[in-house]
Structure formats: C-alpha cells, structure tokens
Image (cartoon, rainbow, N blue to C red):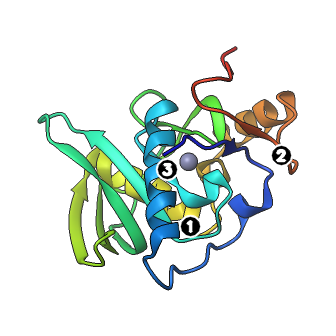
Amino acid sequence: MAALRIVITGEPVLHRRAAEVVEIDDEVRTLVADMVETMQAAPGVGLAAPQVGVDARVFVFDYTDSDDVQWRGVAINPELLVSPPPVGEPDVDLDAEGCLSVPCERFALSRSDRALLRATNLEGEHFEIDAHGWLARIFQHEFDHLEGVLYVDRLQHPHSKAAAKAIRKRSWGSPGQSWMPGEDDLEG
Ligand code: ZN
C-alpha cells in the first residue's frame, strides 16, 4: 500500500465523467487500498478515484458521526438517490464544505440532508446506505466527483466568486498540479 498524489482542480480527470468498473480485480483492490491510505494521510473523510488521477467510478469514505457510529467503506459503480436540497442560503459555518482537490479552502454549499447510496463493495456484493446529515453530504460530494463535478462548481453567489478568486490566487485551474498527503504543507 502507498499513499498517492492528489490532483488539484484543473486536472482533466477531475472534470469529466469517470468510467464504470468492469471487473473487481487486483488492480481495483490495490487502487482502493492506496486510496484508503491516501485519505487517511490527507486526512479526509472521503476520496474519489479521479482525485488520484484514476478514471474509475470508485470512492472511499471514513466518517464517524455525532452518535459515534463509524461509516467506512468503498463504493464501486455507485448510484445515488438524493432528496431535494433545502431552499435558501447556506450557513457559512454549518454548510462549509472542503475538497482535497481544492485543498485548504472551504466554502458554504447547501446539500440535501438525505441520500440513498447503492453500490458494490470490494467483494462484489451490493449494499445500500440510507445516509443523513454530513454522511449524506459526503456521498453527494464523492458521487459528484465521479460525474466530473467539484463542489466549487455548485457554489452560488457570493461563494462562487470567492472560490474562483481563491483558485486564481493559488494559480490552480490548469492541468498538471497535485500534492502529496503527509509531505506537502499547503496551509496558508
Ligand atoms: Zn472532493
């Protein structure tokens, strides 16, 4: 197992629909193990394959909710059924979302409070999770990655403008940029 470099917004693989996984073979098992290590090193609560430069419909997640329940796993070829998002402005604190491909930045985005995930695990078994709250947000965020959508693409004024400015300021938004969890210090 090895942590992988995380690609930054502007890398084409982040901005197009990822390919279905045809067979769960050793290559997929290694990818998932490396993604878990990368997510832990980052650290993050979710990571999608395009974020490590791989064109595949796979994401991993590891999140402990307020009831101390740990939700961890891998979703291969997922489907996501999402309830309608709330209306009105997002809360600047409660709805502040981040992404390892737009590192060190957070912007407020309204998300649905409920999402039903249907996917396949590494053993090839189908599973379903009826997610609420932040877990539902994680699933929406990671599923979006597989559709080529970043959360910054979904922001509304004035957060969209602030995000565009931050991305410009850090000279992101063009291909070829990445960072190494556990090694690169991106703060500031
Ligand atoms: Zn992300």
| Residue occupying the point 33% across, 44% down | 62
Q: Residues within 10 Å of mark 2 (few under 14, many from 20)?
A: some
Q: Nearer the viewer, residue 58 or 102?
A: 58
Q: Is mark 3 within 8 Å of ligand 1?
A: no
Q: Residues within 10 Å of mark 3 (few under 14, many from 20)?
A: many
Residue type of the residue flagged with mark 2: Gly
Gap in angstroms between the C-alphas marked 3 and 2: 23 Å
Task: Point out residue 79 in the picture as x, y percentages from the top left corner.
Answer: 39, 76
What SS does tag 3 mark? Answer: helix
Q: Are marks 1 and 2 in contact (CB under 8 Å)?
A: no
**Residue 103 seen anywhere in this rendered image of the structure:** yes
Of the two numbered discs 1 and 3 in the rendering, the one whose residue sits closer to the viewer: 3
The residue indicated by pointer 2 is: 173
Residue 74 located left or right of residue 186: left
Residue type of the residue flagged with mark 1: Leu
Question: Residue farthest to the bottom?
Answer: 22
Q: Which mark is residue 90?
A: none
| Residue occupying the point 23% across, 48% down | 71
Gap in angstroms between the C-alphas marked 1 and 2: 18 Å
Q: Nearer the viewer, residue 41 or 139?
A: 41
Task: Point out residue 105 in the picture as x, y percentages from the top left corner.
Answer: 63, 29
| Residue occupying the point 37% across, 50% down | 61
The residue indicated by pointer 1 is: 146
